[in-house]
Image: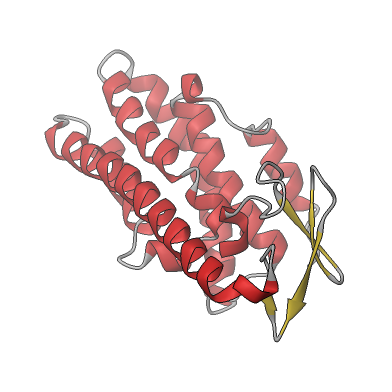
Amino acid sequence: MLVDVLRCPGCERGSLRAERAGYICSQCSAGFPVIGGAAWLFRDPRGAAGEGRGRLTLIANEVARLALTILQEYASAQRKIKDTKNAPEATQDAARQLKILMPRDFIAQAPWAQLQHFARYLKAITVRLDKYRADPARDAARMKELQPLEQRYWRLVAERKGQQDARMQEFRWMLEELRVGLYAQELKTPMPVSVKRLQKIWESRPR
């Protein structure tokens, strides 16, 4: 959501969290209502038009900055896949990941919170292929662990004709984090991830 980009318009320090009646600042506890389905994030209602234009500019600048960073890592990953020789399974897997992660409308498709991690996901592809020559067997072993989880997930997505609930969406991004954990540990993940952990989450999902 675009509101996730913004700081509190009152104290300009806190982040905003959604509540039943609107949004609350994490720092100053100021409240901002939802009017007509939109968050009313203005300090002074009388100056809302001018302040709104300023906020739209901030949002546009932030989206553009993030998109540039993502596209730079995307270009690097594409080059690395193209330049990596004698690694057909690894490069095919990386290319498949890239295609899924980066459709033409990725900015519109992905949740804003996840877009913050896209550059790291893409960097992990480059790091993986940088490491491949030193230990191809290790890469193959990691892929053998990962693929059954991904295949089960995408098979279920296909069965549901692309419809995903919140738990499935969360699992989808955990698969990306697992790739980081398996192939590029130095880039770190925001939560603990492992094959066993994801297997347990998958098996406990509602049927």
Looking at the image, which residue sits at the far top? 134
* Residue depicted at x 44% and y 45%: 118
> Is 78 placed above or below 203 here?
above
* Residue depicted at x 32% and y 56%: 99
Along the line of sight, the residue nearer the viewer: 23 or 184: 23
Horizontal side, residue 158 vs residue 70: left or right: right
Along the line of sight, the residue nearer the viewer: 124 or 158: 124
Horizontal side, residue 126 vs residue 197: left or right: left
Looking at the image, which residue sits at the far bottom? 36
> Is 177 placed above or below 142 here?
below
Along the line of sight, the residue nearer the viewer: 170 or 204: 170
Image x and y of residue 102, in percent: 35, 57
* Residue depicted at x 70% and y 47%: 15
Along the line of sight, the residue nearer the viewer: 21 or 126: 21
Horizontal side, residue 162 vs residue 93: left or right: right
Image x and y of residue 76, in percent: 22, 37
The image quadrant of residue 136 is: top left
Image x and y of residue 41, in percent: 67, 66
